[in-house]
Image: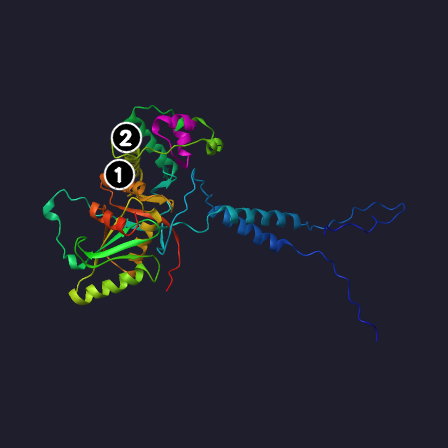
Amino acid sequence: MPRVKVPRKSTAIDMTAMCDVAFLLLTFFILSAKPKTQDPITAIVPAAASEKMLPENDFAAIIVGQGKVFYNIEGADLRMETLKSMGEIYGIAFTPAEINAFGNTESFGVPIKQLKGLLAIPAGDRGNVRQDGIPVDTTDNNELYHWVKETRKADVALRNTVLTVAIKGDSKEEYPKIADIIKTLQKQDQNKFSLITSLRKVQK
Amino acid sequence: MAELDTSGGGKKGGKKVRSKKQSTRVDLTAMVDLAFLLITFFILTTTLQKPKAMDLTMPDKQKDEKVQLDVAESRTMTILVGKGNKVEWYIGQPAKPIAGPTVDGFGKNGLRKTLLEKSAEVKRTQGKDMIVIVKPSSKSTYENVVSVMDELNIVGNQIRAIQDITQDEIGLLQRDGLY
């Protein structure tokens, strides 16, 4: 009986299928990717059992941390529209380049008088700049009031939807600061808003 | 793994040099490596878990006094949020409370237990749901306020409001060392 010869096989594996799968996944992740937004301050949000999702767009977030207030509008067109009307209120003429730069700014926290200066800095270097927060006082100097109001107006004008206002507060923030913001929102009859929380399992 | 041509390149001699038929297989290993590297990058940079939100509805500021509704004090629980992750609650008026004032902590054996017991009691004796008024003091943190609202959501309380704290109630917190 002749011995059965085991043919020596090549060690090369066909990579075509693996490559296909890898690129399919890659395409999926690229398309579904929404890069993490870097807030100028870190706010560790409190945990709650609420499982309601935030809307993808048409929302503005007020970020509170270390006693400072930052503002973030979702959507570049909404941001640009808001800045235009804010410029009119405060009598500051923003150039088209500045409005464009603001359209690409995720969140900011400077008084409107310093906004021109902030927009002049390239986006990559803004993390190193000290931002003192948007003035929120119960007096006339309440810029946040106008920011939220103009965003709401712009949202209606652009998309005819109702803006969701969310508060993203740091856990250790003292309550009076949050109360100021709530009062600011209530002053414009915005009685319903969302508090951004992280998910916590309910202990039974 | 790239296929190498080891055949030695045809026969020698005066014959016509025949071009060797090349394999059409391309080595994809490097390409797959790159693709997976990019996948890893995109997985890590995307926010997989979207932030959750809790809805908060504040009572509309009534300019008209007539619209305001009087409610029985016996079914109104007031939760004062103090410092050091502690709350103090009472039912009725701060001067002569029907139940409490009691200092309570958070969690399932603290505030939640109280809320469940008291709302069941109010429901049983009066046939109506309990009204909860949350009054955060200036020494309380945002986390505590959210926790209280969360507990109210968990126990299924429907009627609640956040209000400003009064001087009497601050005195109550001071007495118990929560302010």
> Is B24 situated left or right of B58 in this image?
right
Q: Which residues are magenta?
A: A99-119
Chain letter of the residue beneath label 2 in the structure image = A
Q: Residue at x 46, y 27 (%)?
A: A121
Sequence order check: which comes first, mark 1 or mark 2?
A: 2
The location of residue A188, given as percent across then percent down, is 23, 39
The Cα atoms of the two marked residues, 1 and 2, are separated by: 11 Å
Which label number is shown at residue B129?
none
| Element at label 1 | helix
> Is B60 situated left or right of B1 in this image?
left
**Residue identifier under label 2:** A141
Q: Residue at x 58, y 52 (%)?
A: A20
| Element at label 2 | loop
The location of residue A109, given as percent across then percent down, is 38, 34
Position above or below: A2 against A202:
below
Q: In the image, is residue A125 part of the stretch drawn in magenta?
A: no
**Residue identifier under label 1:** A184
In front here: A136 or A95?
A136
In front here: A39 or B120?
B120
Chief secondary structure of the magenta portion: helix
Q: Residue A161 lies in what quarter of the image?
A: top left
